[in-house]
Image (cartoon, helix red, strand yellow):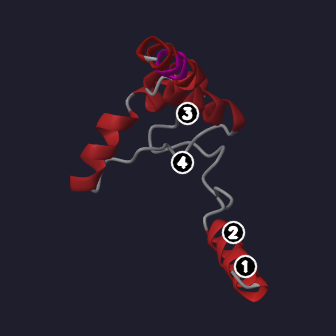
Amino acid sequence: MKKTSLIALGTMCLLLFASCAAGPNPAQGTPDTDGDTAGFFMGLWHGIITPVTFIISLFTADVNVYDVHNNGGWYNFGFVVGLSIIFGGSSGGTCAAKRRRYSSRREE
């Protein structure tokens, strides 16, 4: 590829990634209609039920994947831990790689 094509491709990728960056959450730290803010354990629960919630949210306007009325970092941490519990975390990928290496050695 020409140098100008690589520069153009890099610029487009940079703009694409910059447009996907998260913005500030104005509802963070403010209570919802019940007077509650979601913390670590609600974030953990929401992370665990994300696959089901996502499917429901495609067909229902009242269901969201992420609670915007949260306390910030602890909710986010719980959400990520819940996602890693449900989707296997880093250990699932490591185990799969080991299985592939072991099975390729056996076939040789």
Residue drawn at the location 32% of the way across and 47% of the way down: 63
Closest to the camera, between mark 1 and mark 3, is 1
**First in sequence: mark 2 or mark 1?**
1
Query: What residue is pinned by disc 3?
Result: 38
Q: What is the spatial separation of the Cα atoms under label 1 and label 3, in whole angstroms?
A: 45 Å
Residue 44 placement (x, y as % from top left): 52, 25
Q: What is the spatial separation of the Cα atoms under label 4 and label 2, in whole angstroms?
A: 22 Å
Nearer the observer, 54 or 6: 6
Identify the residue at the far bottom of this view: 4
Badge 2: few (under 14), some or many (20 or more) residues near its Cα, within 10 Å? few
The answer to whether mark 2 and mark 3 are in CB contact below 8 A is no
Residue drawn at the location 78% of the way across and 83% of the way down: 3
- Note whether residue 42 is visible: no
Query: What residue is pinned by disc 1?
Result: 6
Amino acid type at image mark 3: Ala
Label drawn at residue 18: 2
Region of the chain picked out in magenta, as a range: 96-101
* Residue 72 picture quarter: top right
Residue 50 placement (x, y as % from top left): 39, 36
Amino acid type at image mark 1: Leu
Badge 4: few (under 14), some or many (20 or more) residues near its Cα, within 10 Å? some
Q: What is the spatial separation of the Cα atoms under label 1 and label 4, in whole angstroms?
A: 39 Å
Nearer the observer, 54 or 102: 102
**First in sequence: mark 1 or mark 4?**
1
Q: Majority secondary structure of the magenta segment?
A: helix
Secondary structure beneath disc 3?
A: loop
Query: What residue is pinned by disc 4?
Result: 68
Left/right placement of residue 57 relative to residue 73 reads left
Secondary structure beneath disc 1?
A: helix
Closest to the camera, between mark 1 and mark 4, is 1
Residue 106 placement (x, y as % from top left): 44, 11
Closest to the camera, between mark 2 and mark 3, is 2
